Image (cartoon, helix red, strand yellow):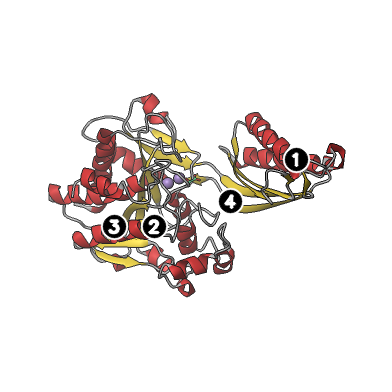
Amino acid sequence: MSFHSMWAELLPVGRSSASGGYRRFAWTGADADCRAWFEQQARSRGLAYETDRNGNQWAWLGDPARGDAVVTGSHLDSVPDGGAFDGPLGVVSAFAALDELRHRGARFTRPLGIVNFGDEEGARFGLACVGSRLTAGLLTVEQAHRLTDAQGITLPQAMEAAGHDPGAIGPDPERLDRIGAFVELHVEQGRALDLSGDPVGVASAIWPHGRWRFDFRGEANHAGTTRLADRRDPMLSYAETVLAARREAELAGAVATFGKIAVEPNGVNAIPSLVRGWLDSRAADQESLDAVVDGVRSAAREYADAHGVELVVERESFTSVVEFDRVLRDELARILGTGTDLTVPVLGTGAGHDAGILSARVPTAMLFVRNPTGVSHSPAEFAAEDDCVAGVRALADALEGLACT
Ligand code: GLV
Ligand code: MN
Ligand code: MN
């Protein structure tokens, strides 16, 4: 099946007709449809298919027990109203690259694996990369059991409802021991390749990043009858904190976003009792990230005190800086440069990826495909079909160089 047909088949799955964006949240019906698609792609190619204890899907060519497999893939879940490319491009390209290698008559000397990591975006349970974190032992079973969605459904309950045994989740070192190299292809989430004029690049590093929950608790009261002077309105401290985040990020040359908010009781004519906002912040280095988060936290404390509001700040997730494996990265740049004599751009990113999680355990690299607008986590996310095909070719070259004679 060509890249084009696979892409067309996956395109309607989990797409909202209202927004045009994707709502493929972990362990929902749309996720199940994506997973069924993955399994069918694996089986139709005669690959050995398995779901691991954490719900990640794998398709194998050759015997992975050998321990030096080359694995590629990405994720199929999405952020709320996400784009079509973030995640699926890496999975569809993985199958298309295998087809290309078979077409070339390549002879594999190492096993090849294709993976769909579960719950990469963390859109439902708040924590990104749950599947890869559990597998790498970077999220404990107890922590995973405490994850809850907006409806109060826990991760184990959601897994069970989707037919996956939550009693099985946990670290999976044996599975990671199978992997000699992991290469994730991903749509670029910025415009570096557009500006350099290249369809494909290689990743150098992922910025340190994390999510912090800010709970501002005040007092619910009548919006019409409560004098301004008598209010303990947490929305005010929250609003001032959003502005502080922008200021701190500008000062540190970093980024900071409050993109999600929950308000109680959430009534037009009631002063809120609680405003819960989630800060996502990322920076090129740890020191700058600490400066932003410390700055936002102390500003929030000051604003909360000024309005008689209680503040609790909790770090919900964190990923340290990831420097991708130098040897593998140079090897990919060499493979992709060969023949055309082109040098391949090497770029860093502020976006998180399963490759970043795995890099703590296995040699890992990433390929990026040009995104002409740089827009991502939005229905407007885009990559031209020619660039996607160039991405498949680059991935096939990389896999051929790493896993074939
Ligand atoms: C994942 O896409 C992230 O960077 O949050
Ligand atoms: Mn994403
Ligand atoms: Mn992604």
Foreground pick, 280 / 321:
280
Q: Mark 2 or mark 1, which has the lower sequence index?
A: 2
Residue 17: image location, x then y, percent: 38, 44
Q: Mark 3 or mark 4, which has the lower sequence index?
A: 3
Foreground pick, 233 / 265:
265
Q: CA distance from mark 3 to mark 4?
A: 31 Å
Q: CA distance from mark 2 to mark 3?
A: 10 Å
Residue 23: image location, x then y, percent: 43, 49
Circle 2 residue: 31
Circle 3 residue: 37
* Residue at (35% x, 66% y) in the render: 51
Residue 341: image location, x then y, percent: 25, 30
Say which mark, if any, is on residue 129: none
* Residue at (42% x, 29% y) in the render: 191
Foreground pick, 75 / 235:
235
Circle 4 residue: 318
SS at mark 1 in the image: helix
Residue 53: image location, x then y, percent: 42, 69
SS at mark 3 in the image: helix
Say few, some or many: other residues with alpha carbon within 10 Å of mark 1 (under 14 / 14 to 19 / 20 or more).
many
Q: Is residue 251 visible?
A: yes
Residue at disc 1, CB closer than 8 Å to ligand 1: no
Amino acid carrying mark 1 in the image: Ser
Query: Would residue 245 be found to the left or right of residue 310 on screen?
Result: left
Query: Would residue 390 be found to the left or right of residue 189 on screen?
Result: left
Say which mark, if any, is on residue 237: 1
Amino acid carrying mark 4 in the image: Phe
Say few, some or many: other residues with alpha carbon within 10 Å of mark 2 (under 14 / 14 to 19 / 20 or more).
many
Q: Is residue 110 visible?
A: no
Amino acid carrying mark 3 in the image: Trp
* Residue at (47% x, 61% y) in the render: 136
Nearest to viewer (mark 3 / mark 4) = 3
